[in-house]
Amino acid sequence: MISIKSAKELEQMRIAGRIVAETHEKLKEVIRPGITTKELDIIAEEYIRKSGALPAFKGYYGFPASICTSINEQVVHGIPGPVVLKSGDVVGIDIGAIYDGYYGDAARTHGIGEISSNAQKLIKVTQESFFAGIEYAREGNRLSDISHAIQSYVESHGYSVVRDLVGHGIGKKMHEDPQIPNYGAPGRGPRLAAGMALAIEPMVNQGKYAVKTLSDGWTVVTADGSLSAHYENTIVITKEAPELLTHL
Ligand code: MG
């Protein structure tokens, strides 16, 4: 069952979303060769708490940090730690915040120092595929219209879309109905209606789409070791173009 958010609920979600977006901006200012992912985690957690919110990922099914940091062949759910970022790395950062009981969730991928033109293109196509998808995030369309647009955009650039992990409804819980695959035929699934809040998050691999989880139980990596990128925003379906809650 997909919940329709009231105007009052959307006010709370806008605040949660803005805090997530600002936290991403904060990290963008400091991310560079030589910084550790643990330092990024501390900066993000401080900013979220200072803003009157809680880090949504901390303790979620036992996740040990406030943000996810996923480097190179890591797709999502990487755990911040002592690893030092170096020039050439591609780092996905996923941030969630809870404000007054409502969730915001967004991911960005950064190139550290000088990255290859291939890596730059992967990051760009991943971000663009999100925007290609939300062209279809309109009242009256079907959910899989978004999925299909993302897949088509990604594959037209020779990349693949991760299938084992999907986007999701969001609101009073981080993961609500519906699940939102980033692939599939158009014209299927629930009809979109104003007030639905969705976290749309293409995960794009330079190689094949298969992924596996490392022995830490969290970190998802590409099965073929190829680079991966992630881009996500929490959006709301409206009568017109979707509203992006986690984008400044
Ligand atoms: Mg998400």
Image (cartoon, grey):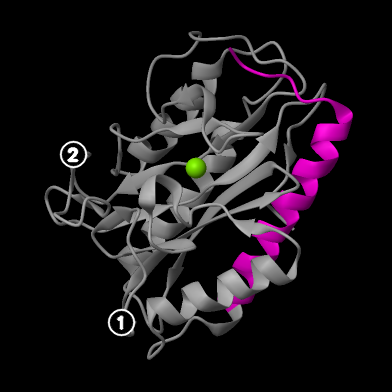
Indicate the position of residue 223 as horizontal and vertical percent values.
Answer: 13, 47
Q: Quadrant of residue 10?
A: top right
The mark nearer the N terminus, 1 or 2, is 1
Mark carried by residue 210 = 2
Disc 1, SS: loop
Q: Is residue 69 above or below residue 82?
A: above
Indicate the position of residue 241 as horizontal and vertical percent values.
Answer: 77, 31
Quadrant (top left, top right, bottom left, bottom right) of the N terminus: top right
Frontmost residue, 100 versus 132: 100
Residue 48 shown left or right of residue 220 in the figure: right
Name the residue tied to disc 1: 82
Identity, as a three-letter code, of the amino acid under mark 2: Ala
Indicate the position of residue 195 as horizontal and vertical percent values.
Answer: 76, 23
Q: Main secondary structure of the magenta part?
A: helix
Q: Is residue 155 above or below residue 247?
A: above
Disc 2, SS: loop
Asked whether disc 1 touches disc 2, contact meaning CB atoms under 8 Å apart, the reply is no
Q: Is residue 32 above or below residue 151?
A: below
Q: Which residues are magenta?
A: 1-28
